[in-house]
Image (cartoon, rainbow, N blue to C red):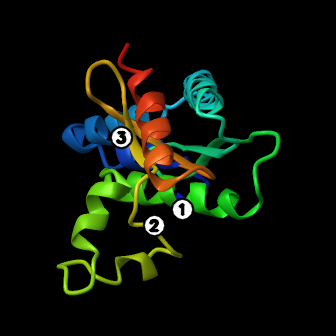
Amino acid sequence: MTIEHIPIQEIHCSVLDFPEYCSGFLQLNERKLLMTSEIAQTVIATAQAKAAEGGFAVSITVLDTTAHLVAFHRMDGAMLGPIDVSQKKARTAALFQTDSLQLGQAAQPGGAIYTLENTNGGLISFGGGVVLRDKNGAFVGAVGVAGATVEADEDIAQAAAAALKA
């Protein structure tokens, strides 16, 4: 059997037989699985309710720890432009495990990470992209909200993230 036919988990854990690496590999896989569709739907429902309270129609993106899409929702009446913006806000938070608003403070002209938005296929460095953590503080993904004011996007995303800790 050639190595191309062996599943990657077997390559890392059985063929190479490095227990400490195998353990790390399995832990990484477990972290990737922390985001479920059920969690994503909770995040979306919370964000949607908070947006409706403020009279906003927004786009909501939920990504896993690898910055891949788990769920997306565009509320009735939401504009088209915020679809991409919500995805980039969530991607920013997921890739750097830091809220987009916090990154934005250092991404201003003259800042240490100015032009960061031009990396990774396009990022966003203003409010509305929030890291998602479970009750134990483990990173499970990110949410991006766009379509209201920047301040309201941030508030909605923070409320959605807080739902996971309740």
Q: Amino acid at mark 3?
A: Leu
Q: Would you call the spot at circle 1 few (<14 residues within 10 Å), some (14-19), or many (20 or more)?
A: many
Q: For numbered disc 1, what is the local secondary structure?
A: helix
Which sits earlier in the primary sequence, circle 3 or circle 1? 3
Per the model, the C-alpha gap separating discs 3 and 2 is: 26 Å
Q: Nearer the viewer, mark 3 or mark 2?
A: 2
Can residue 1 be seen by looking at this rendering?
no
Taking 26 as reference, is 164 above or below it? Answer: above
Given residues 153 and 67, the one toward you in this image is: 153
Per the model, the C-alpha gap separating discs 1 and 2 is: 6 Å
Q: Amino acid at mark 1?
A: Lys
Q: Which residue is mark 2?
A: 124
What's the residue at 56%, 28% (across, down)? 50
Q: Amino acid at mark 2?
A: Ile
Identify the disc placed on residue 88: 1
Identify the disc placed on residue 28: 3
Given residues 58 and 34, the one toward you in this image is: 58
What's the residue at 77%, 60% (across, down)? 80
Taking 71 as reference, is 159 above or below it? Answer: above
| Position of residue 25 measured from the top left corner of the image (x, y, whole percent) | 34, 42
